Each structure stands twice: as structure tokens, then as C-alpha cells.
Image: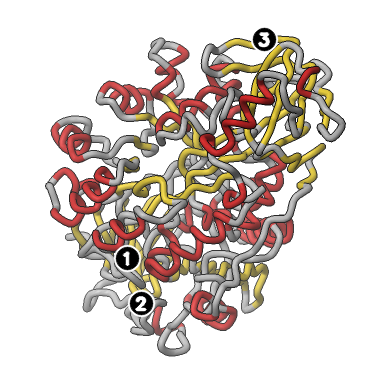
């Protein structure tokens, strides 16, 4: 049952009342389960759920009166009945999949509601791209709600995007049926400094009665943080430690604790609940960024809930943080997030609240998964050619485009270097003494080259720098048109010829990720839609992604989920050091700095 065919609660109420009273048969009855009530945080054995019009009519000990000749009866056999899981903050594009294929990938994991911020495609295609994502999201058999992106560019003056989002576009999007709020407000210095554009976007969202997403990546919890909260963002997922989570909830924000493919921030923050005893209703679980390999092989929100439990969280609290808390935060507590009358009939059957095997999933009153198999169609949007032709380099690149000239007469130089931090979004601002050969600066040891190649307007621009932490060896290069958030092209390598080969290959295929070594392509993940997504099945893309990560390991990289680290090297709103088309960006001071440090 698509959203378009799901009756509203008021429209469905006459039938829901008749079913609940036993005067009319239900469409479906789940019989003999243990009702996990996230409102009261109880497990109540021996209950039945009666469903009609895609919504829950009643949850009672005996729904025999609600069973008629045409009622579908599902035997729970004592298993736990829990609400469908909600992801409070995520970017579908990070899965390298379209909304349809992302839905197909996560439905077997029990995710029935997603709150998505398509700011990746907004940077490439602008409002038109957001509308395409929004429209495909509404076609799915599960709930995909869209937040209108707020920051394209994420840091004005420090990067150039394919398109810019304006307050007028934000106001327009607030009238779309699937828009539930404003995407993460990444320009936190702009909010704290009362930037008129940022405040206009927030105001348009608040006037529409919708939720403003936050993104406060600074460690400063003093005046700057107070000013940011005063500006209106209602949540934040950028915390990495207990103090971050506590500061946010004390100021009336929701602390979103994330476990993505590379972000492991739950364990260090959940102690605010498990040890400090704070009220868990202000805490929410999310993924933020999960690539297709994680989705296919490890899970989605079920993985996050299991992890929270493994970190010492009570299973019922963890479930509350992945269902009701999310729904309440977005003002949708009367639609999703619990197994109670009137809500969309999004139900999971599981035999173990800790291990959380997802044995059967119902979404909007329809069985969508059984034993790990997706049983429903996930319709595709007809993506136009304008969304498939987005890599424009201006000219074929050569090794010379990646050459870094040394100051005259220098034998060594001290360079500012981006330092990758495993399993975290922040980087470190490092310095390294690097050798000069034939007038060009070379990488050495852990330090190799990085380049940001402009790909939206065919300017031919290449910004060169250095990065440390990947551990690459030999003559290799890796290139990606996934380059959060401006989504130009990031090329990292130890050899300039390989870097040129990798960059030109992505121009040839219309975007994606490629790894080269000694003149041979080791792996390719084609992402033809905006250079960000494939419309192929998740399992196929996951296999390509695994081959890509294996190629990275072949080149010497041992970091966990190093691809995610690679893709964030241009994210100029997370400290400490990043690269953009305008230069090397010190995010601590929000200014560009020279590649070479003073002697």
C-alpha cells in the first residue's frame, strides 16, 4: 500500500472503530504475540494486533471477534511484536543506491521509516534533484520522509557546488507532501553568527510547523553552541562523546547517536543514559551514512539497536530510541513509532529482543519481508539524462594536473596535511616534512597526495594537497565523485599518472569510484545518477563496493571502512582540515590556508 493509497487516520477512523469494537472484521490479525509497548516500556505477552486500512485498529488479548472469512491471520507464536524501526537521520545517496533500491535493501532489516536528507544530490542538481529523490521516496512501500536540504554549499565562500539552495526554495519545498523538515544545518558558524540566509531557511521551516535538523561539529560547547541552539536547530548527530550528548539534551535538543558504516559514536555517548541516568526520551538512534556493503552484509537500524544493547542499553530503551523517540521528535507520534491504535501498521516479529533477528516485517498492513526476503516491489523513478550526465572535467587530465611545485630552491618542504581518523568523521590538521624531486613535492611514508577535481562546470580546476593515514603503498590511485558535500571529485594516490587514469575513468563512466594500480583498474563502482547513486540492486552494488574495498586493501589500506573516510575529505564543515575547489580549508577557523607551512 503506497502512501498515496494509505487512508489518513481521520478517513480510516470509522472502520478502525468498527474493527476495534468487534463489529467488523480486520484485514489482518497478528495472533498470540508479546506486545512490546514503547509508550509504557513494557512487554505484555498474549496479545493480538488487529489491522485495517493499513493502520492498527486495536491491540488486545483476544482479537477472535475481529477475524472474518477474508482476514489474513499471522501466528506470532509468542514472538515479540515490536514497532518498525525508524532511522532519524540518514542520506540515501551514501548507500550508493536510489531510494527504491535503498528501500529494498533495508526492508528485510526491519526499517519501515526513514528521515532522509538528500543534500548530496542537492549539491549536484539543486532543487530538481531533491524533487526527484522526494518523488521516488513517496513511491515506496515503506515510509521515506524527506528533509529539505539547508546548506548547499555547506560553507559559503569555502567551496563551490553544482547548485545553491536558497531560502525561497526551502519555503517552496515545505509545501511538498513528503517534506517533514529542514535538513541538517551544517553551517553552524552562520547560524551562530545570525547569517540572514541561514535564519531565513530556519524561519521558513518553523513557520511551516516542521522540524529543523542540526549539525554542530565544533567541540566548543560554550557561547558558540548556545548561539547555535538559540538559532533553532532541534537535534544534532555530530556528538562523539558523553559530554556532547549531555550538552545537547540539557539545551532541549535531541541527541542523535549514530552508527554508520564508519561512524561509531553510540558507545561513547550512550553512557549518558546507562551510567549518568539521563532520561532516554531525548536520545535517538540513527545511521547517518551507510554504504551498500554494510546494508547487505550487516544490517541497518537493527544493527544500530543491537549495538546499543551491546553497549549496555536496556533493550526496551534501545527500541524506544529507534521508534517512538524518532516519531515524537518529528511530530509524527500519531502516525508511526509504536504499536497503538491509528498508527500505520508497521510491525516486526522477532524471537529475541537482544539478538533482534528480523523474522517477519509488516509495513502499512502488508507483509513486506519474511525470513530475510523482500516480498514487495519498490518502484523506480524515471531518472532523466540530466541526472545521469554530471561529470564535466573540461579536458582529459594528465599527471601534470597533479604536480605540486616546490618553492624555488627547496630540497624539502613542510606541508599542511589532512590526517584521517579511523571510525570518526573529524580529521586532524597535521604537518609533515616532504621531499622535493625535480622541483616537485612528493609524498613520503604515510603521506600521499590528494586532489579535488572540479566536475560541475568543466572549469578544469584541480586543487592539490596531501593526506595521511590510509597506508597506501606502490603506484596507485583512488578516485570518487562522491565527495561530501560539494561532490566534485576526490583523487587520492601515490602516483600522479595513476591519479590521472582514475580521474579520466570516472569522467568516462559518468561517475562512481575507481581504484588503480600500476596502470590497471582494480575495481570500479559505477554511480551514473548524479555521480552518487546506482539504480542497480543493492546486492550487486554491494559486491562492487566490496571489490573496491578489497582493492584498497590490496593497495595497503587497513582502515575500517576507509572508503567513507575518503568520501568525506572535502567536507568543509567538520574539523579540522579539509580540501575544496578553493583550497585547503582549516575548519577550526573557517578559512583557507596555504599548502606549505612557514619554515
User: As rendered, which of 464 and 209 lies closer to the eye?
Assistant: 209
Going 39% across and 37% down the picture, which residue do you hit?
A: 237
Instruction: Give coordinates of residue 170: x percent, y percent.
Output: 30, 57
Q: Kindly check if marks 2 and 3 are in contact, taking CB atoms under 8 A apart as contact.
A: no
Instruction: Give coordinates of residue 524: x percent, y percent.
Output: 64, 69
Instruction: Give coordinates of residue 79: x percent, y percent.
Output: 77, 19
**For residue 217, side relative to residue 6 (left or right):** left
The answer to which of marks 1 and 2 sits earlier in the sequence is: 2
Relative to residue 276, is residue 521 depicted above or below? below
User: As rendered, which of 191 and 581 lies closer to the eye?
Assistant: 191
**For residue 181, side relative to residue 350 (left or right):** left
Give the quadrant of residue 100: bottom right
Q: Is mark 2 on a helix, strand or loop?
A: strand
Which residue is labeled 2 in the image? 462
Q: Residues within 10 Å of mark 1 (few under 14, many from 20)?
A: many
Q: How far apart are marks 1 and 3 (CA)?
A: 54 Å
Q: Kindly check if marks 1 and 3 are in contact, taking CB atoms under 8 A apart as contact.
A: no
Relative to residue 445, is residue 124 depicted above or below? below
User: As rendered, which of 76 and 439 lies closer to the eye?
Assistant: 76
Q: Is mark 3 on a helix, strand or loop?
A: strand
Which residue is labeled 3 in the image? 44
Which residue is labeled 1 in the image? 580
Amino acid at each position: 500500500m503506497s502512501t498515496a493509497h494509505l487512508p489518513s487516520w481521520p478517513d480510516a477512523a470509522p472502520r478502525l472503530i468498527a474493527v476495534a469494537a468487534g463489529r467488523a472484521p480486520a484485514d489482518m490479525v497478528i495472533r498470540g504475540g508479546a506486545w512490546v509497548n514503547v509508550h509504557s516500556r513494557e512487554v505484555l505477552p498474549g496479545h493480538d494486533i488487529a489491522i485495517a486500512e493499513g493502520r492498527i485498529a486495536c491491540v488486545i488479548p483476544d482479537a477472535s471477534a475481529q477475524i472474518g472469512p477474508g482476514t489474513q491471520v499471522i501466528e506470532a507464536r509468542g514472538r515479540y511484536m515490536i514497532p518498525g524501526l525508524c532511522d532519524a537521520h540518514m542520506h540515501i545517496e551514501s548507500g550508493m543506491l536510489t531510494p527504491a533500491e535503498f528501500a529494498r535493501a533495508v526492508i528485510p532489516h526491519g526499517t519501515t521509516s526513514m528521515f532522509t536528507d538528500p543534500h548530496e544530490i542537492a549539491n549536484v542538481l539543486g532543487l530538481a534533484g531533491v524533487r526527484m529523490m522526494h518523488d521516488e521516496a513517496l513511491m515506496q512501500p515503506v515510509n521515506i520522509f524527506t528533509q529539505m536540504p539547508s546548506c548547499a554549499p555547506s560553507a559559503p565562500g569555502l567551496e563551490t557546488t553544482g547548485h545553491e539552495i536558497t531560502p525561497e526554495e526551502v519555503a517552496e519545498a515545505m509545501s511538498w507532501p513528503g517534506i517533514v523538515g529542514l535538513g541538517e544545518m551544517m553551517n553552524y558558524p552562520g547560524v551562530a553568527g545570525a547569517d540572514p540566509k541561514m535564519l531565513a531557511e530556519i524561519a521558513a521551516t518553523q513557520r511551516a510547523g516542521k522540524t529543523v535538523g542540526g549539525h554542530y561539529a565544533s567541540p566548543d560547547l560554550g557561547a558558540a553552541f548556545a548561539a547555535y541552539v538559540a538559532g533553532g536547530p532541534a537535534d544534532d548527530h555530530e556528538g562523539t562523546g558523553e559530554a556532547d550528548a549531555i550538552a545537547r539534551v540539557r539545551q532541549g535538543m535531541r541527541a542523535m547517536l549514530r552508527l554508520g558504516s564508519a561512524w561509531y559514536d553510540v558507545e561513547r555517548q550512550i553512557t549518558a543514559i546507562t551510567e549518568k541516568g539521563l532520561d532516554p526520551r531525548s536520545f535517538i538512534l540513527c545511521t547517518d551514512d551507510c554504504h551498500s556493503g554494510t546494508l547487505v552484509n550487516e544490517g541497518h537500524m537493527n544493527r544500530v539497536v543491537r549495538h546499543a544493547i551491546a553497549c549496555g542499553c536496556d533493550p526496551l530503551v534501545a527500541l524506544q530510541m529507534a521508534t517512538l523517540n524518532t516519531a515524537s521528535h518529528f511530530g509524527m507520534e500519531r502516525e508511526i513509532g509504536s504499536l497503538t491504535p491509528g498508527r500505520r501498521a508497521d510491525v516486526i516479529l522477532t524471537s529475541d529482543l537482544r539478538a533482534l533477528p528480523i523474522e517477519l516485517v509488516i509495513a502499512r498492513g502488508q507483509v513486506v519481508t519474511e525470513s530475510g526476503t523482500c516480498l514487495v516491489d519498490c518502484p523506480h523513478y524515471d531518472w532523466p539524462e540530466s541526472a545521469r550526465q554530471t561529470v564535466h572535467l573540461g579536458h582529459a587530465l594528465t599527471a601534470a594536473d597533479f604536480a605540486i611545485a616546490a618553492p624555488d630552491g627547496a630540497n624539502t618542504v613542510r606541508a599542511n596535511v589532512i590526517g584521517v581518523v579511523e571510525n570518526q568523521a573529524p580529521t586532524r590538521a597535521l604537518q609533515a616534512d616532504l621531499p622535493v624531486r625535480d622541483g616537485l613535492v612528493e609524498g613520503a611514508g604515510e603521506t600521499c597526495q590528494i586532489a579535488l577535481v572540479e566536475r560541475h562546470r568543466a572549469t578544469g580546476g584541480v586543487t592539490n594537497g596531501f593526506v595521511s593515514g590510509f597506508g597506501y603503498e606502490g603506484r596507485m590511485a583512488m578516485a570518487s565523485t562522491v565527495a561530501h558535500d560539494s561532490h566534485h571529485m576526490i583523487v587520492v594516490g601515490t602516483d600522479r599518472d595513476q591519479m590521472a587514469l582514475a580521474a579520466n575513468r570516472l569522467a568516462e563512466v559518468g561517475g562512481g569510484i575507481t581504484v588503480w594500480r600500476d596502470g590497471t583498474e582494480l575495481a570500479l563502482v559505477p554511480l551514473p545518477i548524479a555521480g552518487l547513486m546506482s539504480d542497480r540492486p543493492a546486492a550487486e552494488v554491494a559486491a562492487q563496493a566490496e571489490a573496491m574495498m578489497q582493492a584498497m586493501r590490496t593497495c595497503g589500506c587497513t582502515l575500517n571502512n576507509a572508503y567513507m573516510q575518503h568520501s568525506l575529505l572535502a567536507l568543509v564543515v567538520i574539523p579540522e582540515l579539509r580540501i575544496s575547489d578553493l583550497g585547503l580549508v582549516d575548519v577550526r577557523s573557517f578559512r583557507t590556508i596555504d599548502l606549505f607551512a612557514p619554515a
